[in-house]
Image (tube, rainbow, N blue to C red):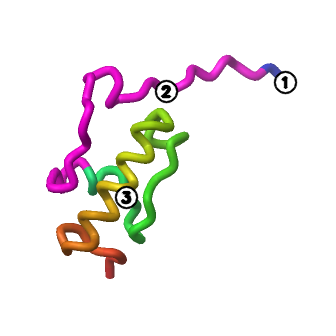
Amino acid sequence: MKKGFIRKKKCKFCMDKVEHIDYKDVNLLRKMVTEKGKILPSRLTGACARHQKRLAMAIKRARTIALIPFVSE
């Protein structure tokens, strides 16, 4: 059985040269959270370690001030 080469995802934030991930950008943050409210891992989002940490922090801040829910119903 032959396995093909899997291309590593590029960091979307590095390619767009994003320095700051804003916690008020609800549309972006909702794409990075599952239906159950879990933060997607970097292997699925394609974010590098730096931006994944900033993304998680932005999601947590948005949850704290109720911009996005902790758990969906």
- Residue 24, position as x, y percentages in the image: 15, 55
Relative depth, front residue between 46 and 53:
53
N-term-proximal mark, 1 vs 3: 1
Q: Tell me the CA gap for discs 2 and 3.
A: 18 Å
Q: Secondary structure at mark 1?
A: loop
Q: Looking at the image, is 56 positioned above or below residue 61?
A: above
- The kind of residue tagged 2 is Lys
Residue 22, above or below 37 = above
- The circle drawn on residue 1 is 1
> Which class describes the residues within 10 Å of circle 2: few (<14), some (14-19), or many (20+)?
few
* Left or right: where 4 falls relative to 56: right
Residue at x 75% of width, y 22% of height:
3
**Quarter holding residue 60:** bottom left
Q: Which residues make up the magenta segment? A: 3-28
Residue for badge 2: 9
Labels 2 and 3: the sequence-earlier one:
2
**Residue that sits furthest to the left in the current view:** 24
Mark toward the viewer: 2 or 1: 2
Is residue 13 rendered magenta in the image? Answer: yes
In the rendered image, which residue does mark 3 sit on? 33
Question: Disc 3 on helix, strand or loop?
Answer: loop
Binning the other alpha carbons within 10 Å of mark 1 as few (below 14), some (14 to 19) or many (20 upward) gives few
Give the amino acid type for the residue marked by disc 3 in the picture. Val
- Front residue of 19/29: it is 19
